[in-house]
Image (cartoon, rainbow, N blue to C red):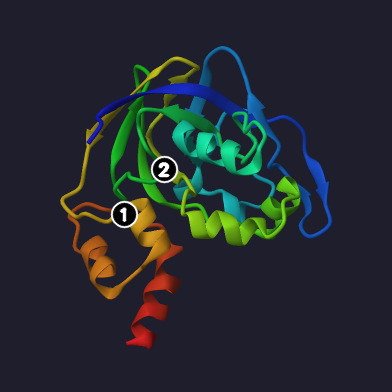
Amino acid sequence: MVDQGTVLAVCRVHALLADQGSGVTAIDKRPVTGPVKVQPYGLFADVQADRKNHGGLHKAVYAYSQSDADFWAVQLGREVPPGLFGENLRLSGVEANSALIGEQWQLGAKAVVEVTMPRTPCSVFQRRMAEPQWVKRFTEAARVGAYLRVLQTGSIQQGDEVRVIHRPSHSVTVRDWFSAPSIAKMQALQNEPGLELAPEYQPYFEKLLRRN
């Protein structure tokens, strides 16, 4: 597995947009130049208009990999510039979908983040992209990117190194959990020493248990 990559772009909100469903959305992220502070609730001067679904300590930063953006560029027949999907980080080398839940990355000289969970596409994203059946297509491709929790604050910028500094002992990746959650994967996550799971996992766990 690759242990090192690069921050291709650091993106934060460009403008709040009116949205017919949520009222307002901060999905319009665009690259910025120069160092940006990474704080417990996300990037300095960034905004999450709906923190219930897109923010908080366990969804502070959203990372997306260039390899997945390249896939969508071919599928859509257009460029997928950094920030189009609402991501804060566009990465090269380190694959967000293949990251283990609980994997830790150092960004630049000081900031440390932890992979917490996959992104779940929503109707706001559908309206943003204006593509037929976008949520379904994005879901089926399972190229969803990863939410990150900030373990250590610091500043990051385009060109910074991304280093994987910790991998948990389980084998559940972001894509694994998004595409095929199971009791076995749930137990692997619950049994991982020191892993703090996002509160959003509990409803999924309860649903899995009811099915069985």
SS at mark 2 in the image: strand
| Residue farthest to the top, as pictured | 34
> Residue 186's spot in the image, x, y percent?
29, 68
Rendered-image quadrant of the C terminus: bottom left
Residue under the image location 55 percent in, 34 percent down: 88
**Residue drawn at 65 percent across, 36 percent down:** 84
| Label placed on residue 149 | 2
Residue contact between numbered discs 1 and 2, judged by CB atoms under 8 Å: yes
Q: Quadrant of residue 67?
A: top left
In whole angstroms, how far apart are the C-alphas of marks 1 and 2? 10 Å
The residue tagged 1 is 196
In this picture, residue 134 sits left or right of residue 110: right
The reply, left or right, for residue 85 in relation to residue 23 is left
In the rendered image, residue 130, in percent from the top left (x then y), is placed at 76, 49
Mark closest to the chain's N terminus, 1 or 2: 2
Residue 118 position within the rendered picture, expressed as x and y whole percent measured from the top left: 45, 53
